[in-house]
Image: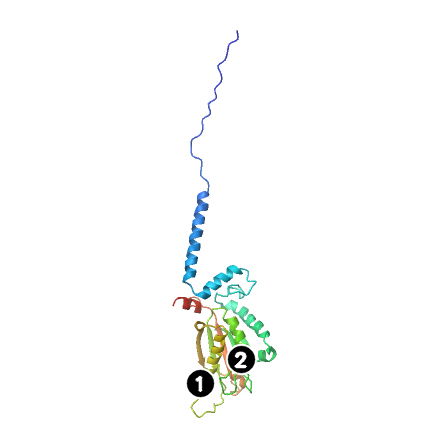
């Protein structure tokens, strides 16, 4: 009789050591940080000015700047962001394009000169002998001045850079008996330009000052009575580091 062999018993023992955990906690932590960042952005927007809210909202509606909503990058840095010196030529180009759409562009553009200076983009509205932007001896704006200032204001109001407005006259004495002189006339014309630009969208906070120089800063010093000396100058200042923009100044009030 054959001998019987005992059955072979194989015992498998399970390794009870902990497996290394995955990176699931990193995903959860990243979600938490993202949610907190979104919360702080919402809180910041709620405390910001209405224009900043529109700027941020406009960016998300049109992130590539294809449209014309506030917040697109038509000027290369977002319409809610102040322009630096390097970006100012883009604003000049936009202003020139806006002028080309005006009805009387061929006549008007001959009386306008835009120059990038150390202080910013200077826009000179120069008079003719008969009076082009303002009636002679008066601060009453002509139809050409209203059309031009409205077109310029529409573009300038899209950036928060400070705006300076200056009035200038020639050296011909103002013929008046009540003491009204070229000093008053230069200031009144600059202020008239400010009112027209405000009506077209430029805010009070954006205007840094309005002042008149009479005949103290002649454009053509060799001919003090040259009509080009009678002008209104608009200066869009560069943004300087540490200097509040009108939007920030308004939000801090």
- Hey, which residue is sitting farthest bottom in the picture? 177
Residue 241 horizontal/vertical position (percent): 44, 66
Nearer to us of marks 2 and 1 is 2
The mark nearer the N terminus, 2 or 1, is 2
Give above or below for 181 relative to 65. Answer: below
Give above or below for 68 relative to 152. Answer: above
Q: Which mark is residue 145?
A: 2
Q: Which residue occupies 48% across, 64% down?
A: 54
Q: Which residue occupies 58% across, 72% down?
A: 97
The answer to whether marks 2 and 1 mark residues whose Cβ atoms lie closer than 8 Å is: no
Q: Quadrant of residue 39?
A: bottom left
Given residues 122 and 143, the one toward you in this image is 143
Q: Which residue occupies 57% across, 74% down?
A: 99
Placement of the C terminus among the 4 image quadrants: bottom left
Query: Judging from the image, what secondary structure is the residue with disc 1 in?
Result: helix
Q: In this figure, which residue is indicated by the disc labeled 1?
A: 184
Residue 143 horizontal/vertical position (percent): 55, 81
């Amino acid at each position: 009789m054959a001998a019987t062999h005992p059955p072979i018993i194989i015992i498998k023992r399970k390794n009870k050591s902990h497996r290394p955990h995955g990176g699931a906690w990193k995903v959860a932590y990243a979600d938490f940080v993202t949610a907190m960042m979104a919360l702080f952005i919402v809180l910041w927007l709620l405390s910001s000015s209405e224009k900043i809210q529109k700027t941020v909202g406009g960016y998300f509606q049109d992130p590539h700047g294809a449209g014309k909503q506030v917040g697109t990058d038509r000027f290369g840095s977002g319409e809610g962001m102040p322009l630096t010196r390097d970006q100012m030529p883009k604003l000049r180009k936009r202003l020139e394009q806006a002028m080309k759409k005006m009805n009387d562009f061929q006549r008007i553009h001959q009386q306008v000169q835009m120059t990038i200076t150390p202080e910013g983009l200077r826009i000179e509205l120069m008079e003719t002998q008969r009076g082009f932007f303002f009636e002679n001896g008066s601060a009453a704006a002509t139809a050409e001045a209203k059309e031009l200032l409205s077109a310029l204001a529409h573009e300038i109001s899209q950036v928060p850079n400070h705006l300076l407005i200056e009035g200038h006259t020639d050296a011909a004495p103002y013929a008046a008996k009540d003491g009204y002189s070229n000093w008053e006339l230069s200031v009144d014309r600059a202020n008239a330009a400010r009112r027209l630009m405000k009506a077209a969208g430029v805010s009070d906070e954006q205007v840094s000052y309005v002042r008149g120089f009479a005949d103290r800063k002649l454009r053509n010093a060799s001919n003090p009575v040259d009509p080009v000396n009678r002008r209104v100058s608009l200066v869009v200042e560069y943004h300087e580091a540490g200097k509040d923009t009108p939007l920030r100044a308004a939000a801090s009030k």
